[in-house]
Image: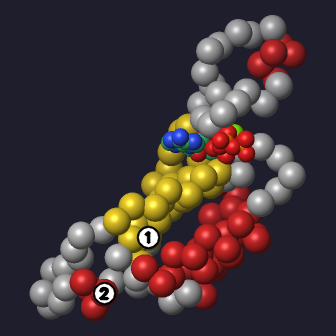
Amino acid sequence: MKEISMIIRPEKLEEVKSILDEINCGGMTITTAMGCGAQKGMTGVNEIKGFKTTINLLPKMMVSVVVEDGAVEPIIMKVRERLATDHVGDGKIFIKPVEEAIRIRTGERGDKAL
Ligand SMILES: Nc1ncnc2c1ncn2[C@@H]1O[C@H](COP(=O)(O)OP(=O)(O)OP(=O)(O)O)[C@@H](O)[C@H]1O
Ligand SMILES: [Mg+2]
């Protein structure tokens, strides 16, 4: 099992929900977030207005989903296909191994608990 954490533009949340629905994921967790990437949150506006800050945090959404290993690449492909624009700030995907999953109601473990 792997945890896929995706940090995305808030307006792309519905698209990601559709993708996760299409691959029949068993659940997801969504968190509102603030963050910056390589541009340190600069969009050009701050410099134009004359403000100087070292880092500017922008609103993002974090989507976390734990899936079977085989679902990872299809999700990455679909997210890139449907979320990539020509502009910086499209977001990032991080993949982590997940040791165990337990459905509390039934005690099912592993893939069966997803
Ligand atoms: N190395 C990182 N660690 C943790 N979070 C990150 C990291 N890089 C990006 N993020 C998160 O992802 C969000 C979007 O990042 P972003 O797409 O701007 O990445 P980038 O590396 O600057 O790529 P681009 O040049 O396409 O903008 C950030 O606001 C931040 O929340
Ligand atoms: Mg960026």
Which amino acid type is shown beneath numbered disc 1?
Val
Q: Which residue is mark 2?
A: 111
Query: Are discs 1 and 2 less than 8 Å apart at CB?
Result: no
Indicate the quadrant where residue 51 lies: top right
Task: Confirm if mark 1 falls within 8 A of ligand 1.
Answer: no
Write the residue at 60% across / 80% down. 74
Q: Position of residue 60 (x, y in %)?
A: 59, 47
Q: Is residue 81 left or right of residue 71?
A: right
The first of marks 1 and 2 along the sequence is 1
**Numbered disc in front, either 1 or 2:** 2
Which quarter of the rendering shows the N terminus?
Answer: bottom left
The picture places residue 28, in percent across and down from the top left corner, at 43, 72
Q: Amino acid at mark 2?
A: Asp
User: Is residue 25 left or right of 108 when viewed as pictured?
Assistant: right
Q: How many marks?
A: 2
The residue lying toward the viewer, choosing from 73 and 86, is: 73
Q: CA distance from mark 1 to mark 2?
A: 13 Å
Image position of 29 with respect to 107: above or below: above
Name the one closer to the observer, 95 or 32: 95
Q: Which residue, given by chain and number where applicable, does mark 1 sit on?
A: 65
